[in-house]
Image (tube, rainbow, N blue to C red):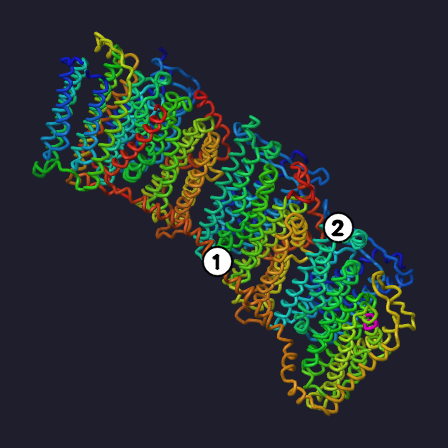
Amino acid sequence: MIGLTHYLLLGTVVFCIGLFGVLSKRNAIAVLMSVELMLNAVNINFVAINKFITPNDVTGQLFSIFVIVVAAAEVAVGLALIISIYRHRKSVDLNDFNLLKW
Amino acid sequence: MFEFILPNAWLIPLVPVLAFALIGLFLHRWPKISAALSIFSIAIAFILALVIAGGVFSAPAGTVYEFSTRWLDMPGLQVDMGLLIDALTAVMLLVVTTVALLVQIYSLGYMKGDPGIASYYAYQSLFAASMLGLVIANNLGQMFVFWELVGICSYLLIGFWFGKYSARNAAIKAFITNRVGDFGFLLAILFLQIMFGTLNFGELSDSMAGFTNMTILIPVAILLFCGPIGKSAQFPLHVWLPDAMEGPTPVSALIHAATMVAAGVYLVARAFFIFSAVPQAMTVIAVIGGFTALFAATIALTQNDIKRILAYSTLSQLGYMMMAMGIGAMTAGMFHLMTHAFFKSLLFLGAGSVIVAMHEEQDIWKMGGLYKKMPITTWTFIIGALALSGIPPLSGFWSKDEILLGALASGHIGLYIIGAFVAFLTALYMFRLIFVAFFGSNKAGAEKAQENSAVMTVPLIILAAISVVAGLVNSPLMHNAFGHYINSPAGIEPHPSLIIMISSTVIALAGIAMAWLIYQKQVISAEDLKYRFEGIYKVLYHKYYIDEIYAWLGARLVDGMAKVLYWFDIYVVNGFINAIAYVTAITGEVLKFTEDGQVQTYALYMFAGIVLLLVSALYAVYTVLI
Amino acid sequence: MTVSLNDLVFVAMALVIVVAATGVVMLKNIVHSALSLILAFVGVAGIYFQLSAGFIGLVQIMVYAGAISVLIIFAIMLVMDKSVEKTNLFSPNIIRLLAGMGLTFLLFVTLGVSIWFTKFPVVPAEGPVDAVGMLANLFMGDYVIAFETAAILLLVAVIGAIILAKGAEDKQ
Amino acid sequence: MDFSLLTTEILVALIGLLVLVVGLVLPDRGKQLVGKLSLLALAIVLVYALIAFPREASYFNGIYQVDVFGNYFKILFLIAGILVMLSASKYIKRFAAKSSEFYGLMILATLGMMVLSASGDFITMYIGLELMTISFYILTAYLQSDKRSSEAGLKYLILGAISSAVLLFGMSLVYAMTGTTIISEIAGAWTMQPAMAAGLVMIIAGFAFKISVIPFHMWAPDIYQGAPIPVTTYLAVGSKAAAFAALVRVFMLAFPPGSISFNWNIILAVLAVLTMVIGNLIALTQKNVKRLLAYSSIAQAGYILVGLVAANTYGLKGVLFYAMLYVFSNTGAFAVATAVEVDAGSTDIDAFNGLAKRSPMLAAIMTVCMLSLAGIPPMAGFVGKFYLFSGAIQAGYLWVAIIGLVMSMVSVYYYLGVAKAMYIGVSIDENPIKLDVPAQMALWACLAGTLLIGIYPGPLSNFVQTAISMFL
Amino acid sequence: MNNFPILSLILLAPLIGAIIIMCLPKDNGKAIKYIAAISTFLSLLLSLVVFIGYDRSLGGMQFVEKIPWIADLGVNYALGVDGISLPLMLLTNLIGFSAVYASWNNKERIKEFFALLLILITGVMGTFVTTDLFIFFLFYEVVVIPIYLMVIMWGSTKRVTKEYAGMKLTIYLLIGSAFLMVGLISLFIKAKGITGVPSMDMAFLATIDFPVSFQVMVFAFMAFAFGTLLSMFPFHAWSPDGYAGAPTAVSMIHAGVLKKIGGYGLIRIGLFILPAGAQIIAPIIAVLAIGNVVYAAYICISQKDLKYIVGYSSVSHMGYVLIGIAALNLISINGAIIMMFAHGVMAALFFAMIGNLYEKSHTRNVDDFGGLAHQMPRLSVGFMLAGLASLGLPGMVNFIGEFTIFVGAFSTYKVLTIIGVSGIIFTALYILRALGNVLFGPRREEWDHLQDLKGPEMVPLIVLGAAILIGGIFPFTLMDLISSGVGDLIAQVGLVQIGGIL
């Protein structure tokens, strides 16, 4: 019987896959995509919790809508930033961006 | 008159201090005026001392006048500046003021043409003031204060010609050796203050009357005696006196013959009630005194410098006085102190005028036949030598005889023998000096010598007169008035015996005769004596190598240790701190390199932190739940 | 335990999401991973429908599957200069890669354990009839401040994107 | 529902939007006017906020709290904003065309901070946080031509996004356990379960990133060095204070200390100690003043966290007191760094050589501000640290106090390193650094603030006392 | 006269002077120097008025001023002087005034120099004048930064670079003060816990009897902090380098007064508020103190640099002060305070003379000099006065201090005091050897160009010399004041009058 735990576990799995994507991918856009995945995982959590814990209330779904809004804004700014960096440095490889260190 | 002066007898030390202050602050540009002021101030002190002595010796024996004002007091510790006038103080006042006055007059001639005359007279009056202060002190604290002031004055006067390295080093040596003595003295004062809560002589003697706890009294007495060992140059701490001859001769006459070195003996006399209560301490004093007398006399035999001979003779005579004190003959000790002050300062001033005449030449073998050129100096010098050797009717005979009598009466036969032998040696080296320097055959040096001016010869004559007359004070002719006034209940009162008088005179004459044979007639030439007793001669000449031993010890213990500790301070203590600083800097450096600029490394560290926190939180919750 | 249809749908959707997510991370070609990302978004929308949160599912499809993925693909186009195949490789630093893998696994284990051993206060009741209406009330009622701030946030994002992307030159 | 109390936020939003619009409408010449206009408007809002300080209300049954605590922070953000914009007046000429948007974004970031510090519920808090952070992403990358600025921006975006994902995950777990996102309701509604602990830790991690506590501090040095100086100042001062306000509200109200079996104080204490030690140690080795000030601000976060760890009157007073004086001291230090960067082009320590000879006032202000950060009397930092560590000792964390104090004294080493360069360093050009009027006003304001709070801390401490009265 | 805030005027006169100097143009040195001289002279004059005006029979805190400062910490700007703090305040002004004159012919950056110097004087004086713990600590730490700036700007690089010396000095003192702050705060918190009233007033805190274990812990912190300031044995590493590196005026104030804050703090806070703690930790301090005396005296013997000699000798003298404090009885604490005053005046005079000599000859190595008495008689008088005072010659105030400490400490620690007294021999040795090498010996031509002290350079010699001699010849002027102060303290704390407790 699928309970709240399973949904949360699914959320955690997607969260961890997203995290691994962020930690390992070379391409900046791939990292952004993984970040999106992580935010989606959180949304799954919120909607699932709303369904099981507070069924006759919609705060969870409200929260996930706000998260979607913020995720969208973030992606927009992120991609704009990547494009602006690409224009100057002709590369999107995160390993090249280490001008600022120790 | 006496009643008026007595309560403000503190004027005696105050007048010279004022002279010192005035010269030091304002008059040091005009030497003439400062010299006059200094002599005038010591003259006033002399007159006051005379009045006081007159008053004390007219009053019945044993009367004591005491006044004191608050100086340093807090609940539990009371040191005040006071006056204690009794026969002992009166005698000391007389001795110090007379010798100081005559020396200051004599210095006018001796120091003529020296640029630093003003500061010389300033130091002279400061010394006089502190010596007088020491004499009239009524408690050990005040005595210690003036004790150290006298020490610093001797440092300044020995090192007066600071241009010379030897003078500078001698001054430092003098002060440090005195300081070692003062260390013991200070400890004794601390013990007494803690034990009896007071330092005043009167109160101390009352509270110590019933006190018999020997385990404390012995160390206190011996520590108290350390002060006199340092100040009166007794055996272990005698090394500074011969070197103190670097100072001008009037200084040696005043300080290193009559007054300062006598302070030690005066302290033993003043605190006699402490020492007499401890028999072990008395024997220690007697033994050290006797040994120093013998030790110094033997060295004096081989010295060639006129001032060094007199210095060792002073050492030996001081040993005599300490021996007297040790065997309980306090009167004999003080009497010898008085007479010795006069004829020894006479001898020193005589030596001074010889040195001036010989243009700074101090080696007796280079002098010769001075008796023709300098009759007054020669004859006064001979009177002094005779007094020193103890030829009757002169003062030395009476005082030395008293001591030998005391030694016999108190049963110290060994000490009597040493005393007699030292008397013989004294006569020998004194007349060795006279025959070589004044009647010696070596004419070369004597041409340019001629008699000094009146300002130098008059004091010599006065002192010669005094040293002739001074002996009678305690002789049977004046039914030993001196002993009547200055005695201590614990002391021994030897009755005069004719045999001792005769035997000591014979010993003295034998000494003179031997000197006459060796040096005047050269029957036994000094050279082969020196050759036959090669080993002994070299040891004696080098003062038993004690200076070298002290120097060796000092270099090892003090300078060597200082370098080791300095090395320790720099490399271990500082090293430790620098190490900490270095470690912090290194950790900072290492941590800095965790930031390699890669976003993903930052994310890695972040999530490592999160995982760690999660694991610890779950562990905490797990222990709570299960 | 009765395996209801709903559970089956959940399992299917979960599989789709996990496969798509791993696809995003593992695929070499950036375009392929972008497409698998879109698949993942659709999977998530499916989960919402299964959780009877229809409106959220629709919003998810419109915003994520629609707008954001298009935006990502545009960005990939703009940034593509090398050949497509090797654009989405793993970062060269092997140690960090392994550490990342280990860390992610550890994180999953801890979170999974903490979720698995917790008894959530589940309330078995049917969902509200008019979820969208209630959402609207909340938006305009209690959470109006959050709503307005979100509006300003979007405005800021737009302006920021334009400034960064268009690249207004600075004066040196 | 009387909305008059929200006027501060509404006014700030209006000014932000107006500035954006006016920036578009006016010709180039007008760009300077925009700056002055916005400053004036902010000043008026500051005055209003000061007047409206004591008035309290709770909106939407706890979702939005207009209370004394929130108002205190609103005043703090306005002061910080004004000071930063004043000190950056010369720097902004670099942004040329987009200088009016800069003002707009800064003001909207201030709005985000206000919402974050005043919200009583997770959702509004998250939105406020994101508004602030996204506007800072853009501001950090504002100088696209400069490689460092865009790189900093990207780094900040990626790390910021991950941390907000973590924060959200934590919030979701807490929401799962309590069923509500409103802080005041959470307090009683939960029991200690592993998921709750995980949620709490994730929330701590999310906020810890914002206030750059040790394991989560890695972004701060690079972003502070890369971003334009006014943005760095505002980041160091404004965003950190806002995060602290939210942290205090969440952890004092939702999870009151002592009452729960899960003692979050110890976790924060360990983080605080780590931050103070490692922050100061790395700062010892820094050669660039901006990066040095970055590490110093990390260490300052450690000190302020000690106040929260103590969670008693003195501790909280210390947090608020220190946040305020931190505005003055840090803005002062960064303002001088701005002046030197504008003049010499770099903020390495050698650029500061001989500053005392060239312009003694600048050197004096820099020394005073940095020593206040180190906690040397008579500057303000001393009183702040006194409060913080009295709280810590009262709460029994003696070891935290000892380590904190010793590390703040170690920090004197690198502050005096800069002072050494200024006072005995030798520089080739001798002419003093030219400063325009607004920058001078900012510098004098910071100096006055640091010294006055230090010498006579009475009024500010009473002000803070009322601000935290709601938590006691 | 009673409500005129004389103490605040004394305290703030130098600060006002500093502010005026800051507004003056950089180049006219004359005006700057005169203002500095006037402000320090004013506070010296007023402190003499207070010294004479202080009612010795009444005792206790007089000239009290109180303004509430921080309400919730119970801090008020409370000033007041009693038997213990008055002599030290007078000492600060004496040294401050002569420090201004000792740096009369400084050439470069006069404006910053005198401004920082005056701030330093106010900072140092503040600790003695206040009766409030918080203000005490505030002034205690304010002093460190001006010293650092003055050392790095005008210091001299000898064995170690001046930056190293300045930084070591600063960090060392600050670490010490960090521990002091922890001690103070826990004291304040515990007092608030016990009485419920937040108060920082020392007199009030002294009435509370804290649990013994707490007292020991806090006293340990205090002992460490004040120990580092007083250069107690293991923590003395900063002071010799600190003095050698610092310019004359700073080393005068530093050796003369800053060290005394440590001693004053130990007595005022250590003994007054935490007697039980003091009682238990006192033997450890006594042993370290004797280590201090002998260790530093020994090192002085091997030193070649004049400033290092005075530096290590002040470490040794501070050993005496420490043993005085550690003996915990009326006499020894009296001795400790008067020793602090004496050492302050002596060290300041010594540094003034060395500074003057260094200015003219640009070397401080003892072997380079010889026979300076020929060329510079007045300077040699100054050197001799300071040297003799430091070796404890009677007739100078140091002897009074040393003698009282020995009597007091002897009753409590017999063996330790005996070792301590042996210190006077080593002190005499290195002082006379150093002075002998520098002043006496044959005349050396290369030093003929040195001209002697004249005009303003004489002021330190006259002012400090007078203090040394008057204090030494008439000790009751100082001693009654101090013993009335310490008497109240001991009575209040209840220690046994003479025997101490051990």
Q: Quadrant of the N terminus of chain D?
A: top left
The secondary structure that most of the magenta stretch takes on is: helix
Specify the amino acid type for callout 1: Phe
Within 10 Å of the Cα at label 2, are there few (<14), some (14-19), or many (20+) other Cα atoms?
some
Q: Quadrant of residue B159?
A: bottom right
Within 10 Å of the Cα at label 1, are there few (<14), some (14-19), or many (20+) other Cα atoms?
some
Location of mark 2 (residue): B196
| Residue E261 point in image, percent of width and height | 57, 45
Kind of element beneath mark 1: helix
Q: Is D261 in front, or is C159? A: D261
Q: Chain of mark 1?
A: B
Highlighted range, magenta: B402-406
Location of mark 1 (residue): B568
Residue drawn at (72%, 58%) of the image: B218
Q: What distance separates the C-alpha of mark 2 from that of mark 1?
A: 43 Å
Report if residue C66 is visible in the image.
no
Q: Closer to us: mark 2 or mark 1?
A: 2
Q: Is B8 in front, or is E332? A: E332
* Horizontal side, residue E251 vs residue C168: left or right: right
Give above or below for B550 relative to B604: below
Mark 2 vs mark 1: which is more N-terminal? Answer: 2
- Residue D374 within the magenta-colored segment of the rendering: no
